[in-house]
Amino acid sequence: MHAAVAILVGVVAATATGLALSPALAFLGAALIAYVASHFLHRTLHAEPEPREGTGDAGETGGRQIPADVGPQLIEKLPVPLLLISQRGRLGYANLAAQGMLPRLTPGQHFAHIIRAPAFVEAVSATLRDGLERSFEFTSYEGNERHFEARVSMLAECEGFGPEAHAIVQVEDRTRTHRIEQLRSDFIANASHELRTPLASIIGYIETLQNHAREDPEARERFLAIMAREAHRMQRLVDDLMSLSRIEMNEHVRPVERLPLNRIACDCASVFQPLASQEGITLRVELDPDEADVIGDRDQLSQVFTNLIDNAMKYSAPGATVTIRSAPENPAHPGRVGVSVSDTGMGIPREKLHRLTERFFRVSVPQSRHKGGTGLGLAIVKHILNRHKGRIEISSVLGEGSTFTVWLPRATQLHIVPDEPPAVAPASRAAR
Amino acid sequence: MSSHIVASFDEDLVQIQAKISEMGGVAEEMLSKALESVQNRDAALASEVIDRDKALDAMEMELEEAVVRVIALRQPVANDLRVLIAAMKISSTLERIGDLAKNIAKRAIPLSAARPMRLTTSIARMGRETLAQLSAVLNAHASRDVDTAVQIWNQDYEIDEMYNAIFREVVTYMVEDSRLIGVGAQLMFIAKNLERIGDHTTHISEMVYYIVKGNTLGDDRPKGEPTGVNLVAG
C-alpha cells in the first residue's frame, strides 16, 4: 500500500514538475492529483469536519472515483513506459509498458545493464547526483537500431521505497518516426533506379508504335506483349518494395503468436506443388508438421518460405529436386529450430554469398531479369527473420546446389498465447 | 548472486559490472558513429568519435583501479573472483574496440574528401553486422545469457567471410583502376578493423561463459572456411 501511494505521488510529482505526458495522460494526471489531494486532506485534516470549498469537492468525488487500490494499476497500465531508479542506480519499479519495451528488465538490476546508451547513463547519473530534471534522446543498437526520447527527474522522498531517493524516467520510442524518414529516402533512391530499366523499354516501344510500327498489326501484338511483361515487372517491383517497407516499419515490434513452424512450411510447399509438376521439378517435403513451435507472425513466416521455395524453383532446371526438411540441431544455434530449403541447381559462388540478402543484389543480372526476379526476395526474408530474432544461413557448393536454412528461436513453455479466451467461445471448437 | 556478509562488497561488484555495461554503451556508440561517418562522408562526426575515445580510456583506468581495490581489500574467491577478472579483461577488450572504432573514424576523414565509391555499402553492411554482434554480446553479459554468448562466438566466422569477400572485391577494384588504390587501401583497413572488432566480441563471449560456467569455451571456434561451403549473415 505504501508503495502504491509512493508511485502515485511519484507520477503526480512528475506531471507537476513538467513531465508533459500526452493529452490522454494529462487527464489521468489530473484525476490522480485529485485523488492524492483527497488522500492528503483525509490524513491531515481528518479532525476538521468541513473541508475547504474547491479542493474539498474535488477531493471527495476524486476519492470515490479512484479507490486506493486502483492507483498502482493505473501506473502499471499507463501506455507510457516508466522506470524508477534508486540513488544507488538500481531499478526499483518498471510498469508494464516499460517491461514490454525492455524485455531484459529484472528488478534490482543496475540501470546501465538495462539501457547502456551513453546519453541515458549520463543523464540519469547526473540527475541522481544533482536532482535537476533533464530531457534527452538516445539510440540503442540491440538487434535493430532504435531511437528514444526520455525525461528524468527526482521524486520527492517517500517511505514506500525505503530511505533512498528515486529518479523517475519516462521513455518514449521514436523509432517509427525515424524509420519513416529513412524509408522515404531509401525507397525513392531504390525504386527510381530499378524502375528506370523497364520504364525506358516501355517508352521505347510506345515511340515505335507511334511511328513506323503504327500500321503493322503483327509488330503491334508483339510489342504490346513485351510492354505488358515489363509493366508487370514494374508492378511486382513496387509490390515487393511496399511489402519490404511494411516489414521494416514493424521490424522492432515483436510478434506474439505461437505457431507451428513446420506446418507453415508444409502449407507453403503445397501451394507450389502444381507449378513444380508443370515445370518437371520434384518438390519433396520431409517435415513433421506438428513439430517446432515458434513465436511469430503467420503471414510473414509464410512469405519467408514462399520466397525461398520460389527462388529454389526459379533456379532449378527440369528434373531437379527441391527439398524442404527440418535442419538437425546445430550447436551454433542453441535454442533455435531450423527448416531448410535446398535445391540441386548451379550453386552460388562463395564471394557472392554474403551479399545475397542485399537489396537488388543479383548473382547473375541477366538470369534474374529473365526469370522476372525483383532482387528483393531474400532482403524481405532477412528483414522478417530480423524481426523474429532469427537468422538465415546459406551454404552452397558450385555445381551441386544451395541450401537456405531458416533458424528461429524455439517457443518456450513459458510463452502464453494471447488468444481469445476459450470460455467466451460460443461452441467448443476443436483447437487448431 | 548470493549476498555477502559485507553488503558494500556486493555494491562494489554491482558497480563494477554496471561500469562494463556503460563502457559497452560508449564502444557501441563510437562504432556506430564511425560507420556513419564512413558512409555519409562526414568528417565532423569522425572527429567527434576520435575525441570520444579518451572517455573510454579513462573509464577503463577507473574500472581497473576499482577492481584492484576490491581484490586487495576483499580477497575474493570463486565466482566473485571470476566476475572481477572477467571485468578487467572485458574492459580492456572494450577499450581496444574503442581504439579500432577510432581508427575507422580516422580513415573516414581522407575518405570524405575522395570521390564516393560503391564499395562503402559492403563495408557499411559488414559494420552493421559487427555492431549487432557487439550489442548482442553486451546484452548477454548484462543478463548472463550463456546461450546467446555461445551463439555469437559461433557466428563470428560470418564476419570473417564478409572480410574475405570485401578483400577480394577491393583488390579487384584496385587492379582495374590504379586511381582507386588510395581509397581502396583505406577501405581495406576499415574492413580489417571491423574483422578485429568481431574477434574481440568473441572474446567477450568467452568471458561471459567463464563467469557463468567457471571454465573456458575452448579454442576450436569456427573460422571462415576455405572450402565452398559458407554461411552469410542473416
Image: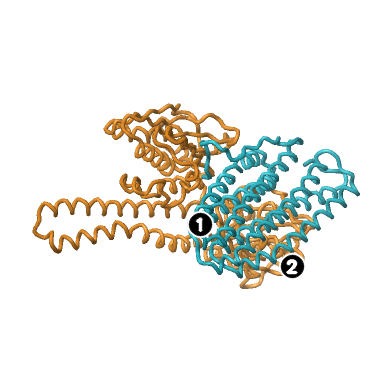
Q: Position of residue A300 (x, y in %)?
A: 43, 44
Foreground tag (1 vs 2)? 1
Up the image or down, B233 lies above or below A13; here it is above
Which structural element holds mark 1? Answer: loop
Residue A91 seen in the figure = no
Rendered residue at 43%/32% (across/down): A400
Comparing A143 with B6, the one in front is A143
Up the image or down, A370 lies above or below A404; here it is below
Colour used to depict chain B in the structure image: cyan
Q: Position of residue B70 (x, y in %)?
A: 86, 50
Comparing B109 with A162, the one in front is B109
Coloring scheme used: by chain
CB under 8 Å between discs 1 and 2: no
Q: Label the orange chain with its letter.
A: A
Rendered residue at 58%/61% (across/down): A148
Disc number placed over residue B119 in the picture, else none: 1
The chain letter under disc 1 is B
Neighbor class of circle 1 (other Cα within 10 Å; few <14, some 14-19, many 20+) is some
List the residue tagged with mark 2: A131
Rendered residue at 62%/73% (across/down): A53
Q: Amino acid at mark 1?
A: Leu
Looking at the image, the residue that sits furthest to the right is: B73
Left or right, A331 with respect to A199, comes to: right
Q: Amino acid at mark 2?
A: Gly
The alpha-carbon separation of the residues under discs 1 and 2 comes to 49 Å
Quadrant, the C terminus of chain A: top left
